[in-house]
Image: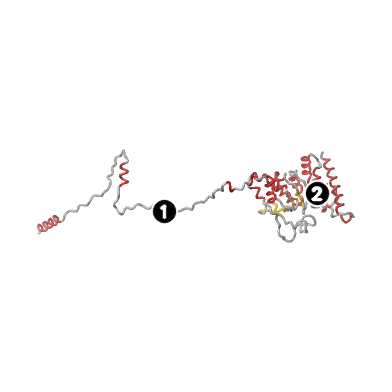
Amino acid sequence: MDFIHASSTAVKAQATPRRVLPKRKRKETSYFPSDSESDLEDHEAVEYNSESEVAPSAKKAKATPAIQTPKPLPKKKIFPFLSLPAELKNKIYSYALTSDDAIHLISKRRNQFRHTVALGDTDSFGKDSRRGSYGYMRSNTNPVIRKPPLVPQLLALNQQIHDETQPILYGANIFAVEDMKALHTFLAEIGPKNCAVLQQISIKQLGHSRTTSSMAYPAFVLLANAVNLTRLEMDCAISWGEGHRIGRAFWREAHHWMESVGRHEGRRDAALDIVELTTKNVSLYLERSGKTKEQLLDEIVADFQRQLRVLLERER
């Protein structure tokens, strides 16, 4: 039985041919260094027949929006403003930087602590106020603030325009300040260079309290840089008294400025031609004097100037 089983197994083995698998097509790998680049080229040229080996697909890059830079205008389309004649440019500057009315400045605080000045209400100057009985007063109501149509940003365009417009902004306008605190803050913010260009200043009040009236002396110290002033209007009551008392009160606060103007002009009493007193200094004596307002003002101004000349001579 074992023999029969072994013979049948041998017959089946002879009947079933052996299956021969084809060799895999691939480049023969050499582990020895080669002097030519042909091996690398041949390796890259091999085509793989296997469907399972698929080259990885490259990730699609995100499209970034192109930044469009504005093309510079051709020179023929740029208006040659800086090449205009000086007379024409000054005319344009005066439209942008000057006001027919005075520029009224009031003291304010910015960010709770920083002292600064702001454009004030032109209607409230000289009216009744909650601040006192004389001088410039803020109205109890809240009227519409009429700001002059100025464009001071013009000075920031470039250095040439700044140099051309600075004398127009500070020299061709009348600056009316609320009190001496506003004057001190204004002069401190514009600096000595701009202060030297100022032409006309109107002071509406020396102070409505001891705090603001104490700013008169430091304000006149800063005003010593304004040696080109042509008019300093004291549109307020300097002192309750006659002309010589007003002169002593003014000298006590403004002697630094008066001496600075005298040195600049070469004449000690040159500041007397600049200071102007208004009728607010004569209102107390007007009724009992029996004179007109203009006559009384002339007498007080003469006494005021005489007292200042005496004080100037003492400093020689």
> Which quarter of the rendering shows the C terminus?
top right
For label 2, count other residues whose C-alpha is less than 10 Å away and answer few (under 14), some (14-19) or many (20+): few
Query: Which residue is the extreme one toward the front?
Result: 76
Residue under numbered circle 2? 276
Element at label 1: loop
Report the side of 162 relative to 255 (left or right).
left
Which callout, 1 or 2, points at the residue further toward the start of the chain?
Answer: 1
Please provide percent x and percent y for residue 195. 72, 45
Taking the image as shown, residue 62 lies to the left or right of residue 306, namely: left
User: Quick one: 190 or 151, which is closer to the camera?
Assistant: 151
Tell me the amino acid under the disc marked 2: Glu
Question: Which residue sits at x=52%, y=51%?
Answer: 68
Residue found at x 84% / y 43%: 309
Residue that label 1 marks: 60
Q: Amino acid at mark 1?
A: Lys
x and y percent of residue 303 in the render? Answer: 86, 47
Classify residue 131 by image quadrant: bottom right
Does 86 sit left or right of 73 as displayed? right
Q: Nearer the viewer, residue 84 or 304?
A: 84
Mark-to-mark CA distance, 1 and 2: 81 Å
Q: x and y percent of residue 209 in the render? A: 77, 54
Query: In the rendered view, how is the structure colored?
Result: secondary structure
